[in-house]
Image (cartoon, helix red, strand yellow):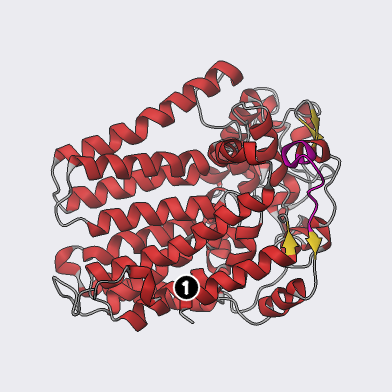
Amino acid sequence: MTALGLAAVLRIITMLGFGPAMWFNDSYDYVSVALRPRPHPIRPDGYAFWLLLLKPLHSFAFVVFTQHVMGLGIGVLIYAVLTKKFGTPRWAATLAAAPVLFDAYQIQLEQLIMSDTLFTLLVVGVIVVVLWQTRMSWQAGAAVGLLLAMAALTRSVGLPILALVVCYLLVKRVGWRPITAMVVTCATPVLAYMGWFKAVNGQFAMTNSDGVILYMRTSLFADCHKMGLDKREDLELALLCINTPPEQREPSAQAYLWWDDQNQLHVFGSGMKFTPEINANASEFAKRAILAQPGDYLATVAKDFFRAFRWDRPRFPDAKTFLQYEFGNPYTLKIPKWSSYQSTTDRDVEAYEQGPAATRMVSPWSDIMIAYQKVVRLPGTVLGILLLIGLYGVAVRWRELGGPVLLPWLAAVGLILAPAATAEFDYRYLLPAVPLACLAAAIALTPRRHAPVRPFRRQRPWMAL
């Protein structure tokens, strides 16, 4: 059996063992938007639009089926570009695709009603299309721009990748036409979405949460005494001060946004955390904290960044979040009855599915994947080694400004660094970086050639996986 076939079997077992889908805290917001379309104040609607597109089928099982296909597609893209474009031996290209094909946490993430698999496919698609071009046309630039727009509307961290790709193409001197086509094609849907967001929420933006989440990032070290806030002139900012001394605060910054008994945002009223005014105040508070305590901020970012490269997998940011990435966790077996927009989460899920949709664990399939997850995963230390190999590839190609290794390597590092700098470490934030790190490492270790060593022998790229 080929690697791709074995990976597909694992996904079939997952669907049989944990149908129709698995659930995360954020899942219910996506379902709510799919049922009642609106620009969500916390996160962009790209994944919710995907759910809306599939809504006529009324099947979360089909939703996760498409996500498993996306996961396999990511592996195919990596294998194809390595063998076809860079002449990487097939065994090495298969090895580079193995983490996204076989990592148990990748497979579990695909079973969740969450945006991450779609986002990963779009980002990998962008990098692969750019790397594949010998001479980029404006049509290819437009295609890349469309993929970037879809990535940004799926997760807002996708938008900075536009700047990264533009800089890369400028260094490669591809000309102004493909770059212009890419920027225009990316900007058009993003600006249209922001206009819709303004019409509904009153702010020309993609979310009302960026400032609040940055406030969460600074909550572990922000000291209002060091920030020099005047309680009379800066009253709205002073109300956000956390009175607990920094050394006695919770280990996770999420406590100061999501946990109602800890965060200060409730001083403005219940349900007010993600309004334009609170978002602006929280953003200003966070910026002042960073400027007043740059050393503390950098230390916090570095701690979360290097947390990604641990060999073990400690429970972080809290036990409940950690367990939602595990097969067989108790939180996905019952849909919570939380308040939702014009409804409740359990009614939303049942309306979309037109029936019950809580996860049903079915033996022996569930037992197989629970046992598999205990053994097969990519440790953070291995991810760090892959990034070091990519860095080596960039260094030895310094005359070419990093060559083709530079783009996937920077994208991988950026996807790990961005959450550490703006939010907080979370295990699912690492997974989109893994295929890019594997791609960069594989290109770095492949002898430089202009054409593959052996062309395809009338078979499609995925046939040898």
Q: Is residue 184 visible?
A: yes
In the rendered image of this protein, does residue 118 appear above or below residue 361? Answer: above
Q: Residue lying furthest front in this view?
A: 458
Percent x, y of residue 219: 67, 47
Q: Where does label 1 land, which residue?
A: 4
Residue 21 location, x and y as percent? Answer: 71, 55
> Crowding at label 1, few (<14), some or many (≥20) Cα neighbours within 10 Å?
many
Residue at 72%, 78% in the rendered image: 368
Q: Secondary structure at mark 1?
A: helix
Q: Quadrant of the C terminus?
A: bottom left
The image quarter containing residue 40 is top right
For the record, the magenta segment spans: 349-359
Q: Which residue is drawn at the image coordinates 56% and 55% (left, top)? A: 67
Q: Is residue 419 above or below residue 229?
A: below
Amino acid marked by disc 1:
Leu
Instruction: Tell me, yes or no, whether the highlighted magenta stretch contains residue 351.
Output: yes
Figure quadrant of residue 162: top left
- The answer to whether residue 38 is magenta is no
Q: Is residue 359 above or below residue 337?
A: below
Which residue: 77% across, 39% down? 354
Q: Position of residue 386 (x, y in %)?
A: 42, 75
**Residue nearest the observer in this picture, 461 or 165:** 461
Q: Nearer the viewer, residue 431 or 248?
A: 431
**Residue pictured at 15% horizontal, 75% vertical:** 449
Vertical placement of 350 versus 205: above or below?
A: below
Q: Position of residue 295 (x, y in %)?
A: 52, 56
Number of numbered markers? 1
Q: Nearer the viewer, residue 110 or 286?
A: 110
